[in-house]
Image (cartoon, rainbow, N blue to C red):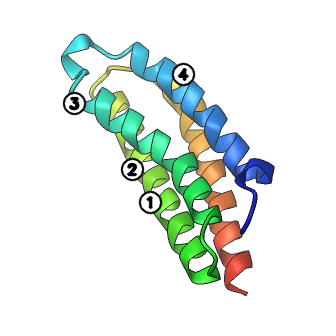
Amino acid sequence: MRNFRELEVWKDARLLVKETYKLTNSLPDSEKYGLTSQINRAVISIPANIAEGCSKYSQKDFIRFLQISLGSSYELETHTILCQDLEFINQNVASPIIGDIQSLQKRISSLIKYNKS
C-alpha cells in the first residue's frame, strides 16, 4: 500500500481544489446546481481517486484509479473552458487554472506510465 500523503501529485491536486472552489464561488447563482456542482465534483474527484488508488494492493487497481483521476481532470478542464465560453469568467481567470490543470494532467499521466513499466 502507498502513502498518498507523500505524493506530490496528490498535494498539487488539493491545491487545485482550493483554486477551483474560489472560481466556482464567482459563478452566477443560476449555475449552483449546474456548472458549479459539476466543477466541484470533478475537482474533488482528482485527489480523492489518487488517494483511493493508493489503498489498492495491485498495481493494476492503482493505475485504474489514477486513470479515473485523469479523466476527472479532463472533465474539469472542459467545464472551465465552458465557463469561459459562456462568459462567466474571462481569459485572465481561466488561463492560469487551465494551465494548472494541464500540468497536473501531465504529471498524472507520467505517474500512470511509470507504474505501468
Tell me the residue that label 4 is attached to: 92
Q: Are marks 2 and 1 in contact (CB under 8 Å)?
A: yes
Q: Residue at x 52, y 22 (%)?
A: 93
**Can you identify the residue that label 1 sits on?**
71
Residue type, numbered disc 4? Asn
Task: Depth check: give the residue in front, 54 or 68.
Answer: 54
Question: What separation in Å lies between label 4 and label 1 (alpha carbons)?
Answer: 25 Å
On the image, the x and y values in percent for residue 50 come to 59, 57
Mark 4 to mark 2 CA distance (whole Å): 20 Å
Residue sitting at x 60%, y 35%: 16
**Helix, strand or loop under label 1:** helix
Up/down of 28 relative to 18, above or below: above
Identify the amino acid type marked 3: Gly
In the picture shown, does residue 3 fall above or below 100? below
Alpha carbons under labels 2 and 1: distance apart: 6 Å
Q: Residue at x 54, y 76 (%)?
A: 61
- Cα–Cα gap, marks 4 and 3: 23 Å
Name the spot of residue 66 as percent of width and height, x first. Answer: 56, 65
Residue labelled with disc 2: 75
Query: As drawn, is 31 to the left or to the right of 106?
Result: left
Disc nearer the start of the sequence (2/3): 3
Quadrant (top left, top right, bottom left, bottom right) of the N terminus: bottom right
Instruction: Look at mark 3 in the image and give the residue it sits on.
Output: 34
**Does residue 36 appear to the left or right of 116 in the view shown?**
left
Q: Earlier in the sequence, mark 1 or mark 3?
A: 3
Q: State how far apart marks 1 and 3 are (Cα).
A: 19 Å
Q: Nearer the viewer, mark 4 or mark 1?
A: 1
